[in-house]
Each structure stands twice: as C-alpha cells, then as structure tokens.
C-alpha cells in the first residue's frame, strides 16, 4: 500500500501541474504540497549540504508540515552538521524543492545518523501498534516524527531511532521510540 | 576552503571549454532587482527548536572524551585501488604482445600456413584494444561523469564610456561569502575585445538563491547594490553571465543584465572534442 503511494506521489504532482493546479487555487498561490516520505527529499538535501560543506553529515530530521496517516508530510526538515565549520545548517523540502535553507541559531552538535534507517511510513506503522489505546481513548494523532541518534534510548544511546510523538487535547503526549534499523519499538512513555 | 576543491586541471579545462563554447541549454534571463526580495518565512524543525534543551541534554549521553590523535589517516577512495589493478592488466597486456612478437620473429613465415595465425593475432590485438577502451571508459566515468551543482560567474561587456566602468565587482553568495573581482587593465582590455572573464566558481545549493552585486570605484562608489535572483539547476554546471555593457551609475548595479545557462558533464565532454 505504501509502495503504491510512493509511486502515486510524483504522478499526482505531474497531474496537478498538467491540470494547472487543483480547483480553488488561484494563479500565483504556492503549489499544493504533494505528501512525501522522509527519504524522498534526502538526495536533494544531501547535494545541497555537500555544496555547503563536503563533510556535512545528516544529524536530524523531522516533519515540517502535518503528518498524514501514512507517515507522509507536505514538507520535511533536515539538519546537517559540519565539523569543519562547527555549524549546523537546515534544509526544508517541499514538492522536491528546497524551500528554505538556514543555519541553526543554536549549538546542536549531534552525531551523524546511521545510514540504514527505515522510512517515515514504516516508522509510523511500527509505532501505531503501541499507540492504539491512546488514539482510541483521547483521540490522539501523530504530530511529530523525528529521526536522530542517541536521543531516547538509554540502554543503547548510539542507536538511530525514530520518535513518534502523539498528541491529544487534554492529555499528556505519547512518545513511541522505534529502532530505525529494524522497526522494533524500543520504548513508550507519556509525558 | 570550499574553493580549494576546484584546484584540479580537468575542471579548469572543462570550465574554460564550456564557457568559451556556445550555451548547451536555453538561456534564462536573471531577475535583477534593486531591493532584496523578502524570504518566505517557513517554520522548520519546530520540535527541535521547542525542545532544544531536552534534546541537547540527551546528546550528553553520547559525549566522548577526546584523546590525543595519533597515526591519523584519511580514508582511501576505492577507485584508486582499482587503478592499480588496471595498471597491472595494462602491463600484462604489454607482456602478452612482447611474447607474441618474440614467437613471431622466431617462426616468421616458416610456412605459408602461418598466415592463418595472423588472423588470430589480429583477434588478440582487438581484444587487448577492447580491454584498453574499457579502462579508459572507467576513467572517463570517474572524472568526467559526475557533475555536482556548481555556479560559474562570468563577466562580459563594458560601458562605452570609460568613466562609467567600475573598478571592481563584489558578489555575495547565499552563504554570505563576498567575492571581489577587480577589473584591472588586463581584464578590462579582454572585455573591450569581446572576451569574458570568470570571477567565481564554486559549488552551490540547488535551490532559489539571491546574490548581492556591488560595484565600486569612481562614480560607482556608494551606489545601490543589485540583487540577482536565480535557481541553479541540480547536478549541472550553471553559468551566470553579468553583462556590464549597459551600466549607468544612476541605475546603480541594477543596470547589469544577467542570464544563466547550464552544461552537464556530457555537454562538457562534447565541448572538449
């Protein structure tokens, strides 16, 4: 199903372009964002980061626009760190274009992500199994998907993990940490 | 630092050939504006920014104590290992030819039937040439086949009136790095003769960019800068041409005419032939 969506996204973008945009969108309005998985914007931002600094390594990513039920978002944010420049630079990708690029205004010297990580759709699918009660009881939904190394697993701090944050009105957030290498849920907590 | 990456001869030849030849793809006029266009303020990495103290504290778990570095080594490009193998097979091919030649001398025209062997010798030569061609194709792919997004800025033309010529141009790219290019007598003379002058060559992020152009010297001192708005094409060598012919100090730097065009690695290889 996700694979079908993966193929559908570029086709949908092309169809929108051919049709001159969706109904109700005036000329000059920004194009409607086609939902992408986190990995779909990666090649583009890697190219950009290499242009910035050859040693730039991806250290963090999260969805910049709302997630859909499949783990796709209209815009993703990627953060790279360069040891040579001792600086972090973020890129935001929408519709296969970098729509924002800027230095991070504070120090965040995180280690590079492992090169092997499951995509956002698989991560959300893995987390959803642990979030069923929270969603049912509080009407919670996944609002943030973030990928980083060493963030949330005390036993294996070197692990690259997806963290899915579920939020609901009137209830503390639910955090589900997923091992990004194999999709296994490592930790669940409320807070 | 980033500019140092361009200190290899192939790239320089490629740029020279590409800049001198006709543009391979459609030229695109560049928007030159007097006022810096506002950037769209899109919120990004919000969770990180809102929870930065917590996330940074998690990084402390990973913090390692640095020790004195000894016997450092850089990682080796695996291609260089294959070049050794290629060289070895080249020498092996030479040996094969030598052996063939010695055998040929010893039995030269010993019999009319030996003529049949000439054909097999030709087959052998052909296979060795094929192997050589394969090696050359590998080298070409390694050194000519990978074009990353880069921008080359070239200057063309000068105002007819000498007193309107700026003494120098300053370009500030999206990284905030200013690059100054003086229009010294050598460059001015080249421009007067219809030549072009390269003033910038570096990698660029493949996204919409706004660069600042300032002109200095003589009547240009204190004039308004111009803002060049363009989008480098990904994985292509992007040429940005600044035509100074119509410059007039009363217009400030916005009087410059600008356009872009691109060349890919394949176009470059053609230009070299």
Image (cartoon, coloured by chain):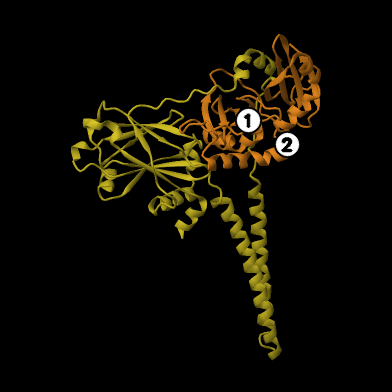
Chain colours: A orange, B yellow
* Crowding at mark 2 (Cα within 10 Å: few <14, some 14-19, many 20+): few
Front residue of B160/B105: it is B160
Picture residue at 28% right of the left edge, 45% below the top: B157
Picture residue at 78% right of the left edge, 17% below the top: A136
Is B58 on the left or on the right of A14, as rendered? right
Quarter-wise, where is residue A126 in the image?
A: top right
Per the image, the residue denoted by label 2 is: A2
- Which mark's residue is nearer the viewer, 1 or 2? 2
**Above or below, B176 relative to B190:** above
**Above or below, A18 relative to A116:** below
Evaluate whether residue A15 shows in this view: yes
* Crowding at mark 1 (Cα within 10 Å: few <14, some 14-19, many 20+): many
Quarter-wise, where is residue A187 in the image?
A: top right
Evaluate whether residue B64 shows in this view: no
Picture residue at 61% right of the left edge, 35% below the top: A41
First of labels 1, 2 by sequence position = 2
**Which element type, helix, strand or loop, lies under badge 2?**
helix
Front residue of B80/B269: it is B269
* Spatial CA span between label 1 and label 2: 25 Å
**Above or below, B218 relative to B48:** below
Count of labels shown?
2
Picture residue at 61% right of the left edge, 39% below the top: A12
């Amino acid at each position: 199903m996700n694979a079908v969506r993966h193929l559908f996204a570029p086709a949908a973008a092309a169809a929108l372009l051919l049709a001159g945009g969706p109904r109700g969108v005036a000329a000059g309005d920004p194009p409607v964002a086609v939902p992408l998985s986190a990995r779909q914007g990666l090649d583009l931002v890697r190219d950009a980061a290499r242009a910035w600094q050859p040693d730039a390594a991806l250290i963090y990513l999260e969805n910049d626009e709302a997630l859909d039920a499949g783990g796709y978002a209209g815009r993703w944010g990627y953060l790279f760190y360069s040891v040579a420049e001792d600086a972090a630079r973020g890129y935001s990708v929408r519709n296969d274009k970098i729509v924002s690029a800027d230095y991070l205004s504070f120090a965040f010297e995180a280690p590079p992500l492992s090169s092997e990580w499951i995509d956002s759709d698989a991560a959300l699918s893995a987390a959803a199994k642990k979030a069923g009660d929270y969603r049912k009881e509080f009407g919670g939904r996944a609002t943030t998907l973030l990928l980083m190394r060493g963030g949330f697993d005390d036993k294996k701090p070197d692990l690259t993990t997806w963290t899915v944050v579920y939020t609901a009105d009137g209830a503390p957030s639910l955090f589900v940490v997923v091992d990004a290498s194999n999709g296994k849920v490592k930790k669940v907590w409320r807070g | 630092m980033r500019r140092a990456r361009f200190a290899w001869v192939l790239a320089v030849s490629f740029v020279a050939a590409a800049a001198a030849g006709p543009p391979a793809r459609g030229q695109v006029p560049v928007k030159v504006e007097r006022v810096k266009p506002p950037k769209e303020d899109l919120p990004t990495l919000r969770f990180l920014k809102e929870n930065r103290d917590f996330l940074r504290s998690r990084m402390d778990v990973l913090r390692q104590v640095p020790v004195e570095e000894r016997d450092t080594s850089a990682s080796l490009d695996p291609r260089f290992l294959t070049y050794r193998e290629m060289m070895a097979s080249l020498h092996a091919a030479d040996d094969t030819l030598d052996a063939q030649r010695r055998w040929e001398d010893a039995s030269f025209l010993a019999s009319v039937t030996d003529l049949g062997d000439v054909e097999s010798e030709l087959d052998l030569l052909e296979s060795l040439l094929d192997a050589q061609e394969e090696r050359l194709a590998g080298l070409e792919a390694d050194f000519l086949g990978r074009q990353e997004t880069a921008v080359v800025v070239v200057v063309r033309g000068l105002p007819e009136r000498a007193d309107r010529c700026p003494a120098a141009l300053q370009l500030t790219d999206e990284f905030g790095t200013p690059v100054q290019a003086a229009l010294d007598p050598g460059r001015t003379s080249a421009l007067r003769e219809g030549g072009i002058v390269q003033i910038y060559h570096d990698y660029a992020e493949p996204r919409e960019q706004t660069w600042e152009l300032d002109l200095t010297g003589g009547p240009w001192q204190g004039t308004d800068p111009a803002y060049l708005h363009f989008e480098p094409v990904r994985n292509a060598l992007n040429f940005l041409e600044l035509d100074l012919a119509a410059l007039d100090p009363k217009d400030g730097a916005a009087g410059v005419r600008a356009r872009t065009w691109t060349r890919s690695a394949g176009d470059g290889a053609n230009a070299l032939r």
